[in-house]
Image (cartoon, helix red, strand yellow):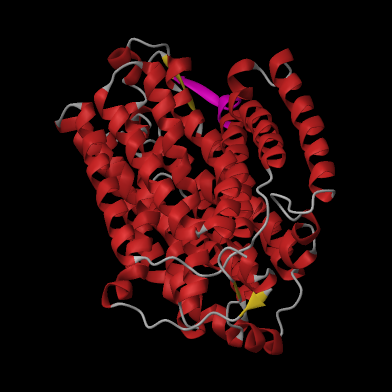
């Protein structure tokens, strides 16, 4: 039986819960990006092939996609703080393993462990809903959402500086230390939420979702390398359709499903999931293309020939902007509703890509365009979890936000494949090698901007954003289920 939670005055250290959770979100994004500057040198450093080295990115992507909804559901059932600490612990353990070895097999396995960190943001958002008064939830959730971009902007220059001036294992020792600090702070400052969603954990649903997502994302991430019409890729996509179809059938017939599909396909939840996929696609193209474009040789006529360190520093303004605009996003959502914030974010994203199309040869214009894209991303990313929180019961917030983050991840994976396909088909020979043309980059920007406008259209189709709905949502307190019920 549902019972109202007994208010418990926060301990002094729990006043630090919001910055501590935000630090955990930044760490998650840093862990995902620090390996990028290493990729060109890893074949030489590990004695592995470039194809094997690419799995250090793919393994993290696959593990994160599978574990995010699973750990979200586990958090709703067994305690969000407990599962959050487990995710941070796996992330830190993976970093320590990377610091201790040069064996590519262990490195790939360690990077898969780090994929568990993808669940940190949805779990943290759910904790914030349970623990904070309504008037503080919006700004805290907006800050938590922006940590994805902040961490990504910080991770690249941090890794580039360490790789350039120290042994590459030092980078992983540094992230191990940061991970241990984040774990200790979360243990110290975050208390366990009393909100529970009792029931039996859906093991069969977990295995089915995991198998289906691995087939789907493996096909998307490796399609460019293996060939989109090759037997393995086509087979993976067919398997994904069959497995996920059977998984959906099983979920609809299970008393306590891993993902409540009836809730997830409703307009109030389903449309924000679609918007998350489209926004993830639009946002990721900026990160992928900007780094390549500014490092392109000057002989191309558009490239700036920047070093990896200089490229990383070019990403820093975007992280600062996401930090500064997160409270602005919260204020817009409070005044106009998160649906409007999401729609405005999509429009701003598209405007940023319009700037990139107009001029991608001057550094200051590139930085301005990237900054506008980051602003739109901040608005959109901070609105998505707020839409989810207002549409699902308190006992399902971590799992529902986990699915939303999963949709962003799928969007980013598809964006990576689509951008790569565009650039591969628009190349020119410079200095004895093939490099993308400026037209290819502009086509990638056009594609991302169009997808951002589609996200805007989806946002405007989300129902239930009236002033009455917003007032009701603001006054709603979380409902707890007695522990052990």
The spot of residue 304 in percent (x, y) is 33, 37
The spot of residue 374 in percent (x, y) is 46, 58
Horizontal relation, residue 115 to residue 220: left or right: left
Question: What segment is highlighted magenta in the picture?
Answer: 423-429
Identify the residue at horizontal 43%, vertical 25% (top origin). Answer: 109
Identify the residue at horizontal 59%, vertical 85% (top origin). Answer: 474
Residue 62 highlighted magenta (yes or no): no
- Name the one closer to the observer, 376 or 331: 331
In the image, residue 126 sits, relative to residue 174, either above or below, namely below
- Which quadrant holds residue 470? bottom right
Residue 343 shows in the view: no
Identify the residue at horizontal 41%, vertical 38% (top origin). Answer: 114
- Name the one closer to the observer, 52 or 367: 52
Total numbered badges shown on the rendered structure: 0
- Name the one closer to the observer, 452 or 27: 27
- Which quadrant holds residue 103? top left
Identify the residue at horizontal 32%, vertical 63% (top origin). Answer: 20
Residue 485 shows in the view: yes
The spot of residue 151 in percent (x, y) is 36, 52
The spot of residue 408 in percent (x, y) is 59, 50
Residue 425 highlighted magenta (yes or no): yes
In the image, residue 32 sits, relative to residue 57, either above or below, namely below
The N terminus - image quarter = bottom right
The furthest residue to the left: 165
- Name the one closer to the observer, 299 or 225: 225
Horizontal relation, residue 453 to residue 17: left or right: right
In the image, residue 313 sits, relative to residue 263, either above or below, namely above
């Amino acid at each position: 039986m549902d019972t109202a939670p007994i208010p418990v005055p926060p301990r002094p250290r729990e006043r630090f819960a919001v910055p501590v959770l935000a630090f955990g979100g930044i760490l998650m994004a840093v862990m995902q990006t620090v390996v990028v500057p290493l990729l060109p040198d890893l074949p030489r450093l590990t004695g592995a092939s470039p194809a094997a080295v690419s799995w250090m990115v793919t393994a993290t992507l696959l593990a994160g996609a599978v574990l995010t909804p699973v750990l979200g559901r586990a958090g709703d059932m067994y305690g969000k703080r407990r599962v959050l600490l487990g995710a941070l612990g796996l992330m830190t353990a993976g970093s320590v393993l990377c610091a201790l070895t040069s064996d590519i097999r262990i490195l790939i396995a360690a990077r898969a462990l780090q994929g568990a960190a993808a669940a940190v943001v949805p779990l943290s958002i759910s904790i914030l809903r349970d623990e904070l008064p309504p008037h503080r939830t919006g700004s805290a959730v907006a800050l938590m959402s922006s940590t994805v971009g902040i961490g990504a902007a910080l991770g690249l220059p941090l890794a580039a500086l360490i790789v350039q001036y120290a042994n590459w294992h030092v980078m992983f020792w540094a992230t191990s230390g940061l991970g241990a600090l984040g774990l200790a702070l979360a243990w110290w400052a975050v208390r366990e939420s009393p909100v529970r969603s009792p029931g039996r954990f859906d093991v069969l649903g977990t295995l089915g979702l995991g198998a289906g997502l691995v087939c789907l994302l493996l096909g998307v991430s490796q399609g460019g390398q293996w060939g989109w019409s090759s037997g393995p890729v086509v087979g993976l996509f067919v398997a994904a359709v069959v497995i996920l179809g059977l998984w959906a059938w099983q979920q609809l017939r299970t008393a306590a499903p891993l993902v409540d599909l009836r809730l997830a396909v409703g307009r109030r939840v389903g449309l924000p999931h679609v918007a998350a996929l489209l926004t993830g696609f639009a946002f990721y193209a900026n990160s992928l293309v900007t780094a390549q474009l500014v490092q392109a040789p000057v002989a191309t006529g558009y490239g700036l020939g920047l070093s990896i360190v200089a490229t990383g520093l070019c990403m820093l303004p975007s992280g600062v902007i996401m930090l500064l605009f997160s409270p602005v996003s919260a204020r817009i959502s409070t005044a106009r509703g998160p649906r409007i914030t999401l729609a405005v974010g999509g429009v701003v994203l598209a405007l940023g890509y319009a700037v990139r199309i107009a001029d991608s040869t001057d550094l200051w214009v590139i930085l301005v365009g990237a900054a506008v894209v980051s602003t739109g991303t901040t608005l959109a990313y901070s609105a998505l979890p707020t839409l989810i929180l207002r549409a699902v019961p308190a006992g399902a917030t971590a799992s529902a936000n986990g699915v939303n983050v999963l949709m962003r991840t799928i969007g980013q994976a598809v964006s990576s494949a689509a951008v790569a396909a565009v650039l591969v088909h628009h190349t020119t020979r410079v200095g004895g090698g093939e490099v993308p043309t400026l037209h290819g980059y502009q086509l990638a920007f056009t594609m991302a901007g169009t997808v951002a406008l589609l996200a805007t259209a989806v946002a405007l189709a989300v129902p239930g954003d009236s002033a009455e709905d917003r007032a009701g949502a603001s006054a709603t307190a979380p409902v707890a289920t007695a522990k052990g019920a």
